[in-house]
């Protein structure tokens, strides 16, 4: 019989799709859960206060950031006493120089139990990105945003296939969809 563990659900999608907003809306429903952001974990590990600086790192430093994320994530997980971890993360990082794919090995080392891919229409994503004055993001056309979202989805599907764990697709703002995915994951872990 498998030892009980705290389920980890990686919530991913393109920058500006509304992942963080959706997770924040879920907070009151999961009082014992940890709500962690990959970018914040990396910022703390790299001791930088500027999240936008992370996107500008050269490729070898991007890989190092992912190693730091995995290491720090497991340190945090060992100390965590809650009943669920939602990790706000990306499958593809939108950089000024282009897109950077997160390797499947990074996800494997995080040991997630499921992925939730948050999606929306590109017009809505573009509008959110324009309205968010707290972040500096590369300017992208609607066609580029569409390709970015497809690439993110394909990476997430690949992670799911290679790790043999479920992936759920949830429309941006669909709190019920996120909650149903979490309930499915918890049920599956309980039954194993």
Image (tube, helix red, strand yellow):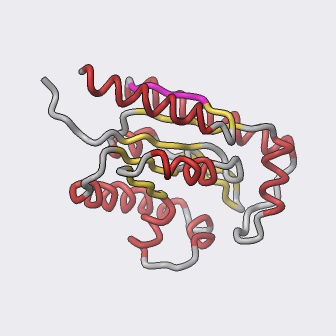
Is residue 120 on the magenta stretch? no
- In the image, the segment drawn in magenta is 165-169
Task: Using residue 165 as the reference point, say whether residue 14 is left or right of it.
Answer: right
Q: Nearer the viewer, residue 118 or 150?
A: 118
What secondary structure is the magenta-colored segment mainly?
A: strand
Task: Using residue 92 as the reference point, say whether residue 27 is left or right of it.
Answer: left
Give the position of the C terminus as an image quadrant. top left
Q: As displayed, is residue 27 above or below residue 150?
A: below
> Where's residue 44, x and y in %?
42, 72
Q: Residue furthest top?
A: 191
> Where's residue 85, x and y in %?
38, 48
Q: Nearer the viewer, residue 71 or 169?
A: 169
Which residue shows up at 52% across the image and 43% down it? 11
Q: Residue furthest left?
A: 1
Q: Nearer the viewer, residue 89 or 66?
A: 89
Which residue shows up at 62% across the image and 68% down it? 56
Task: Using residue 19 as the reference point, say whether residue 89 is left or right of it.
Answer: left
Place residue 46 in its image quadrant.
bottom left
């Amino acid at each position: 019989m498998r030892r009980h563990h705290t389920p980890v659900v990686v919530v991913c999608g393109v920058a500006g799709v509304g992942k963080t907003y959706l997770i924040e809306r879920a907070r009151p429903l999961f009082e014992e859960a940890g709500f962690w952001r990959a970018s914040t974990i990396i910022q703390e590990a790299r001791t930088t206060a500027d999240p936008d600086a992370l996107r500008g790192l050269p490729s070898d430093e991007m890989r190092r950031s992912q190693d730091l994320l995995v290491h720090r994530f497991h340190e945090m997980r060992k100390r965590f006493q809650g009943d669920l971890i939602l990790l706000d993360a990306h499958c593809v990082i939108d950089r000024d120089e282009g897109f950077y794919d997160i390797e499947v090995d990074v996800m494997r080392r995080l040991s997630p139990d499921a992925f939730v891919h948050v999606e929306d229409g590109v017009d809505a994503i573009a509008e959110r990105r324009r309205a968010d004055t707290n972040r500096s993001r590369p300017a992208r056309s609607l066609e580029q945003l569409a390709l970015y979202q497809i690439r993110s989805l394909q990476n997430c599907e690949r992670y799911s296939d290679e790790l043999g764990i479920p992936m759920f697709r949830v429309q941006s703002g669909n709190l019920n969809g996120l909650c149903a995915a979490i309930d499915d994951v918890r049920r599956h872990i309980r039954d194993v």
